[in-house]
């Protein structure tokens, strides 16, 4: 058998073919990767519908994380900035001050700051918040519900079978688009 | 040399003898004992520095009261505008029917309609006749002779505004304004005026009472309850609605005195309650008139309990300190007729029913039952007594509830129908309930055998649709925080496909 030698022309053809294959493969791979990424982004994740949540407290205890990925959010445009905040204070507080005995939050995750008379600003310390919903309950029952729970998606493990969702008695856990993973407090009308 | 015997003649083993010998010899000072603690201490210091350089835990902070420096709120009337009447382009409508004060002509939140109301609504809801922009608030409307009266607040001008609108198209007929500084606090205005053929009385957020001519808007007289009686303005401003009884308007300052009757004609005090009930505190609750044992009386839920006074001279007839709500008492008492009166409230207060009895020519109260908040307790709105049942939205979990007069829950509207703190009323045999967050108006049958919804319509943007509704001549007036609308509920005008 005669040994085939690589000519200059053959070399150029080989280079062309190789470049074509690489270009084709790269393009296909890129498109596939982009498609996968888009699918992942356009998938769905768990979120809490504030209108369904009944503040049962299970978000604090049923998350697989040591500290729940559910946190209290505060919709400031709705807040009345009340001195007597029913999300901050026990139903029958001894006094309207920051003493632990007067506060609903067991760990002091809801902070208040005097703004000007008669206003106080209430801010959630998310590092402390465990999503127990006590403040949400107080705010919803006696106020207008500007405090509400949401799953923080920078913390959530995105378990396929969310343990809180499986145990939510109000069926408040719903699937929402991953690229729009939060449910505004006023839902559909907030943007109007 | 150890020969196995000690000097005292006892025998020792060889090992022990060797140890004794070693102990006696000087040892090389390679590892001095004094260095060991130093090494251990250095190790500890190194470990401590390492530990301290790691992410530190949050410091423990005591949760103790903070001494905020606060100023005293100013409730005085401004001097810029002591009172101005501004005419508008509107004209009174030629429409019969009235809703003259809080909870309507019967003070029961029940209306009857001369024309049949639609029991089905088209997809877009019943027609909205007009929309009027309002300052933030929950003030409801009073209606009389084709005019709609509502108290409002203009934040730009810092003025309370008593407005008279046309029932036909919502255009303003006149407004009476006066300067006062009011800050947002879950809304500003939140009372319903009272009107008859000659007088209109409104209570402002900071307890200023104005009596006007309902046709022209001209001032008859005014009164500052803070200046006059040292009233403590309730949290979130005044919510008490005045009631007109004959020639007088009845108001409960909750201070000294607890209650007064003021002549509509002159503005003079006709009677005042005695000092024994002074200082019981003003609440958001309104006075409930009732008649028992042949005596007309006014019942008021103060901060320190319930007080009933005689309508003719203001003498105290009975008190009931067992019903008081520590944070805010908002619903008014509900007289069930005969001898029973029903109280409800929020903040875990629940509800209670008392029976009035006469003993030795005095009136006493007996508690018939008390309901926990989980069973029933209206947070803001006053429940409606219709037939032999009580209808109201209970805050846990904000569903419409029907109670019998023994306090038993007959039904709830279910988890898919929650109404928050929204208002409700009955027209003919229909329940009208407004969802406070979404502004959705629900129409249901007022029946004791279950919640039967007929229709619903998305009418308001929301949020905080807390203002009481008003009804006259097939028209329903309702509002959210910043807008008031008038809806035509008449069957002849609703039209469209049934839902």
Image (cartoon, coloured by chain):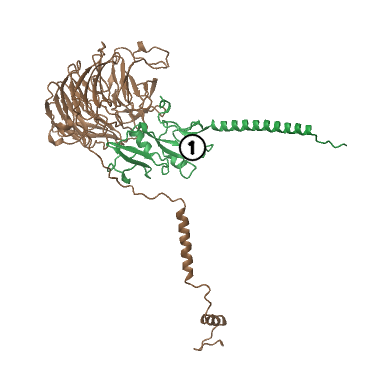
Chain colours: A green, B brown
Q: Nearer the viewer, residue B237 or B177?
A: B177
Residue B329: percent from the left, percent from the top? 26, 33
- Count of marks overlaid on the render: 1
Q: Which residue is mark 1?
A: A153
Height in image: B21 above or below A46?
below
Where disc 1 sits, the SS reads: loop
Residue B186 located left or right of residue B263: right
Instruction: Kindly identify which chain the residue marked by label 1 belongs to.
Output: A
Q: Residue furthest front?
A: A8
Residue B110: percent from the left, percent from the top? 28, 21
Quadrant for the C terminus of chain B, please: top left
Residue shown at 78% from the left, 34% from the top:
A8
Residue B416: percent from the left, percent from the top? 42, 27
Q: Nearer the viewer, residue A29 or B100?
A: A29
Height in image: B70 above or below B471?
below
Q: Quadrant of residue B192?
A: top left
Q: Nearer the viewer, residue B387 or B242?
A: B242
Label 1 crowd bin: few (<14), some (14–19), many (20+), radius 10 Å: some
Q: Nearer the viewer, residue A130 or B291?
A: A130
Quadrant for the N terminus of chain B, please: bottom right
Q: Residue furthest right?
A: A1
Residue A185: percent from the left, percent from the top? 41, 31
Q: Quadrant of residue B72?
A: top left
Q: Is residue B335 visible?
A: no
Q: Is residue B478 visible?
A: yes
Residue A69 located left or right of residue B358: right
Height in image: B431 above or below A77?
above
């Amino acid at each position: 058998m005669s040994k085939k030698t690589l000519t200059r022309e053959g070399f150029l053809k080989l280079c062309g073919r190789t470049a074509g294959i690489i270009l084709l493969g790269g393009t296909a791979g890129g498109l596939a990767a982009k498609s996968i990424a888009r699918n992942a982004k356009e998938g769905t994740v768990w979120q809490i519908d504030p209108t369904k949540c009944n503040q049962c407290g299970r978000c604090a205890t049923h998350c697989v994380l040591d500290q729940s990925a559910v946190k209290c959010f505060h919709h400031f445009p709705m807040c009345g900035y009340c001195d007597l905040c029913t999300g901050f204070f026990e139903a029958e507080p001894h006094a309207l001050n920051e003493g632990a005995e007067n506060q609903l939050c067991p760990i002091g995750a809801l902070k208040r700051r005097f703004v000007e008379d008669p206003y106080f600003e209430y801010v959630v310390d998310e590092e402390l918040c465990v999503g127990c919903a006590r403040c949400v309950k107080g705010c919803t029952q006696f106020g207008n519900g500007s405090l509400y729970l949401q799953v923080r998606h920078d913390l959530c493990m995105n378990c396929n079978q969310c343990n809180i969702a499986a145990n939510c008695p109000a069926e408040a856990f719903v699937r929402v688009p991953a690229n729009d993973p939060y449910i505004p407090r006023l839902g559909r009308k907030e943007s109007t | 040399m150890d020969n196995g015997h000690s000097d005292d003649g006892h025998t020792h083993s060889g090992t022990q003898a060797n140890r004794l010998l070693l102990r006696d010899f000087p040892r090389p000072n390679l590892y001095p004992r004094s260095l060991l603690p130093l090494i251990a201490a250095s190790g500890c210091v190194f470990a401590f520095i390492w530990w301290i350089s790691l992410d530190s835990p949050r410091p423990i902070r005591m949760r103790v009261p903070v001494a905020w420096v606060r100023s005293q709120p100013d409730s005085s009337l401004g001097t810029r505008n002591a009172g101005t009447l501004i005419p508008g382009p509107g004209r009174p409508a030629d429409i019969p029917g009235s809703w003259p004060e809080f909870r309507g002509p019967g003070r029961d939140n029940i209306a009857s309609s001369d024309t049949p109301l639609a029991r089905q609504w088209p997809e877009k809801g019943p027609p909205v006749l007009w929309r009027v922009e309002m300052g933030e608030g929950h003030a409801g409307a009073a209606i009389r002779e084709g005019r709609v009266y509502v108290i409002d607040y203009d934040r730009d001008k810092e003025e309370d505004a008593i407005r008279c609108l046309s029932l036909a198209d919502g255009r303003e007929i006149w407004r009476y304004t006066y300067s006062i500084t009011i800050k947002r606090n879950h809304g500003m205005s939140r009372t319903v005026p009272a009107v008859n053929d000659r007088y209109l009385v409104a209570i402002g957020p900071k307890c200023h009472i104005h009596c006007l001519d309902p046709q022209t808007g001209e001032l008859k007289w005014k009164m500052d309850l803070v200046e006059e009686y040292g009233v403590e303005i309730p949290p979130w401003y005044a919510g008490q609605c005045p009631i007109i009884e004959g020639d007088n308007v009845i108001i409960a300052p909750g201070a000294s005195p607890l209650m007064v009757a003021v002549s509509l004609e002159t503005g003079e005090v006709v009677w005042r309650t005695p000092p024994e009930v002074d200082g019981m505190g003003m609440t958001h609750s309104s006075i409930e008139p009732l008649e028992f044992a042949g005596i007309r009386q006014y019942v008021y839920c103060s901060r320190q309990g319930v007080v009933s006074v005689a309508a003719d001279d203001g003498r105290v007839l009975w008190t009931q300190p067992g019903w008081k709500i520590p944070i805010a008492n908002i619903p008014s008492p509900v007289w069930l007729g005969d001898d029973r009166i029903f109280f409800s409230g929020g903040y875990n207060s629940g509800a209670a029913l008392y029976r009035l009895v006469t003993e030795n020519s005095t009136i006493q109260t007996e508690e018939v039952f008390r309901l926990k908040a989980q069973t029933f307790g209206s947070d803001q709105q006053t429940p409606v007594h219709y037939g032999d049942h009580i209808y109201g939205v209970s805050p846990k979990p904000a569903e419409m509830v029907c109670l019998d007069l023994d306090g038993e829950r007959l039904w709830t509207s279910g988890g898919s129908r929650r109404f928050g703190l929204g208002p409700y009323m009955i027209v003919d045999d229909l329940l009208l309930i407004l969802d406070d967050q979404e502004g959705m108006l629900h129409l249901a049958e007022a029946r004791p055998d279950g919640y039967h919804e007929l229709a619903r319509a998305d009418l308001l943007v929301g949020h905080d649709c807390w203002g009481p509704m008003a009804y006259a001549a097939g028209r329903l007036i309702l509002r959210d925080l910043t807008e008031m609308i008038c809806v035509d509920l008449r069957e002849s005008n609703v039209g469209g496909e049934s839902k």
